Amino acid sequence: MDPRDRAAFVRSYTKVLTAAWSDDEYAARLENDPRSALAEHGLELPAGATVRIVRNLGGEPDLEAQVELWEGGAETGSYELRVPNSPQIELRELSEADLESVAGGGLETPDNPDGTVYCCCCSPCCCCT
């Protein structure tokens, strides 16, 4: 697969995964009519080709293995698409320190004891450091 085709496959595969993880209706269509569901996100199958959706995977997902499986399907006409169960996201409450670090809070240093943040436009005539 040349780099352009690989990038197009990865982009479409990512859309399929995202849709399968976030939309129960799409996930059902993917199981019941995979050809149409895949086409919705740019993964067209040749006439006469078959596709098997594999949901229960052990271990970590492997993008390179999926690319190789898709390439193999192009040669044999029998495709396998691995769609792992939706990733588990750990939700936790953010601390004040977490919020400060993403909100542009200043870092207190010996040269900047109060953590004041100075902003400039960094245009060619800018002289701030």
Image (spheres, rainbow, N blue to C red):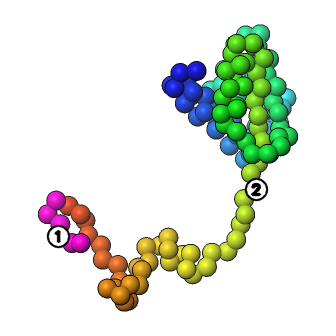
Q: Position of residue 59 (x, y in %)?
A: 79, 45
SS class of the residue under badge 1? loop
Vertical order, 62 against 72 (above or below): below
Image coordinates for residue 71, horizontal then vertical, percent: 67, 21
Left or right side of 109 for 126: left
Badge number at residue 88: 2
Can residue 1 be seen in this snapshot?
Answer: yes
Which of the two discs, 1 and 2, labels the residue nearer the N terminus? Answer: 2
Which residue sits at x=50%, y=77%? 100
Q: Which residue occupies 75% across, 13% down? A: 77
User: Which of 43 and 68 lies nearest the eye of the viewer?
Assistant: 68
Which residue is at the far left? Answer: 125
Q: Quadrant of the C terminus?
A: bottom left
* Mark 1: amino acid: Cys
Q: Is residue 127 magenta?
A: yes
- Please name the residue that numbered disc 1 is placed on: 127
Is residue 106 located in the magenta-colored stretch of the structure? Answer: no
Q: Quadrant of residue 24?
A: top right
Q: Residue at x 85, y 40 (%)?
A: 56
- Cα distance between the residues tagged 1 and 2: 47 Å
- Please say if the residues under marks 1 and 2 sit with CB atoms less than 8 Å apart: no
Above or below 68: residue 22: below
**Amino acid beneath label 2:** Gln
The quarter of the rendered structure image containing the N terminus is top right
Q: Nearer the viewer, residue 26 or 126?
A: 126
Residue furthest out toward the top: 48
Is residue 39 visible from the viewing direction of this image?
no
Please state which of residues 78 and 111 is positioned toward the viewer in this rendering.
111
Secondary structure mainly formed by the magenta segment: loop
| Magenta span | 124-129
